[in-house]
């Protein structure tokens, strides 16, 4: 018999100032890393062109979202950019972790900080930052999704969000996309080799005691 490492599912929290390239990187990770699943958030904002309910987000009304808050269905939630609610439902995360799947969460910095403060979850947090504020502005403009007024607001928010870096486990600069992707993969793979995450440690001891 050969030993296979079996590990507990890990929760990866990924946060970044808007426009840093977090969605781009997460999409590539999900395509390229096995056993990694995405936690689909709930939001009260309208779907953008091409977004699919139940794939990109669960799009719900303000009333439905507040009902979920009352019944304690969220791990965390926040009003992002003072506008819409965004939240991670417990049912999106817990059962998958128990099944040994790794789950990736794309949440804003406030939401990440809420989870860190609660301190009742085991997770690895990764902060993605742009190479400079000028490059962030350029990416937000080139993305062509937000008005200039919205972009200026996001840049102010970004400067405040960077201060939360100290609370994260890892930091990745998204300058060259391929390099940032490779750093993210290294972090995920390293976590998968932590002895404390093994669920078959006893099996390994037993196996070598018998040989
Ligand atoms: P976020 O999800 O963090 O708001 P996006 O993934 O939407 O950011 O990326 C913002 C814009 O920057 C997009 O137009 C994307 O194509 C572009 N982008 C992402 N990563 C890079 C990179 N490393 N270099 C140049 N442009 C990038
Ligand atoms: P967008 O509307 O562009 O998809 O997302 C806006 C912001 O909301 C992003 O910074 C994204 O990380 C954040 N976000 C998405 N889902 C969640 C969530 O479940 N909780 C929190 N706190 N933020 C979220």
Image (cartoon, rainbow, N blue to C red):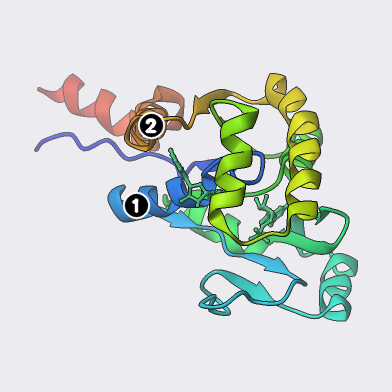
Query: Where residue 69 sits: x, y (%)?
Result: 86, 65
Quadrant (top left, top right, bottom left, bottom right) of the N terminus: top left
Q: Is residue 79 visible?
A: yes
**Mark positioned earlier in the residue sequence (2 or 1):** 1
The residue carrying mark 2 is 176
Quadrant (top left, top right, bottom left, bottom right) of the C terminus: top left
Q: Quadrant of residue 161?
A: top right
Numbered-mark total: 2
Query: Where residue 135 sits: x, y (%)?
Result: 56, 33
Kindly report the distance in space between the C-alpha atoms of the residues bearing marks 2 and 1.
Answer: 25 Å
Camera-side residue of 200 and 71:
71
Vertical relation: 128 (above or below) 38? above
The residue carrying mark 1 is 35
Query: Where residue 190 sits: x, y (%)?
Result: 37, 26
- In terms of secondary structure, where does tag 2 sit? loop
Q: Residue at x 29, y 49 (%)?
A: 32
- In terms of secondary structure, where does tag 1 sit? loop
Q: Quadrant of residue 154?
A: top right
């Amino acid at each position: 018999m050969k030993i296979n490492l079996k590990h507990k599912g890990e929760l990866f929290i990924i946060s970044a100032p808007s426009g840093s390239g977090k969605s781009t990187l997460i999409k590539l990770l999900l395509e390229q890393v096995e056993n990694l699943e995405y936690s689909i958030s709930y939001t009260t904002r309208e779907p953008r062109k091409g977004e699919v309910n139940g794939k990109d987000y669960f799009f719900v009304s303000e009333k439905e979202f507040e009902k979920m808050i009352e019944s304690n269905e969220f791990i965390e939630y926040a009003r992002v950019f003072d506008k819409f609610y965004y939240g991670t439902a417990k049912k999106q995360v817990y059962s998958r972790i128990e099944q040994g799947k790794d789950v990736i969460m794309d949440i804003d910095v406030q939401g990440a900080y809420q989870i860190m403060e609660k301190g009742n979850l085991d997770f690895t947090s990764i902060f993605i930052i742009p190479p400079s504020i000028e490059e962030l502005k350029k990416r937000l403009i080139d993305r062509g999704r937000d008005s200039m007024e919205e972009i200026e607001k996001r840049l102010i928010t970004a400067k405040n969000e960077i201060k939360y870096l100290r609370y994260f486990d890892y930091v990745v600069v998204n300058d060259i996309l391929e390099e940032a992707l490779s750093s993210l993969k290294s972090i995920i793979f390293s976590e998968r080799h932590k002895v404390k995450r093994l669920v078959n440690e006893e099996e390994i001891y037993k196996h070598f005691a018998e040989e």
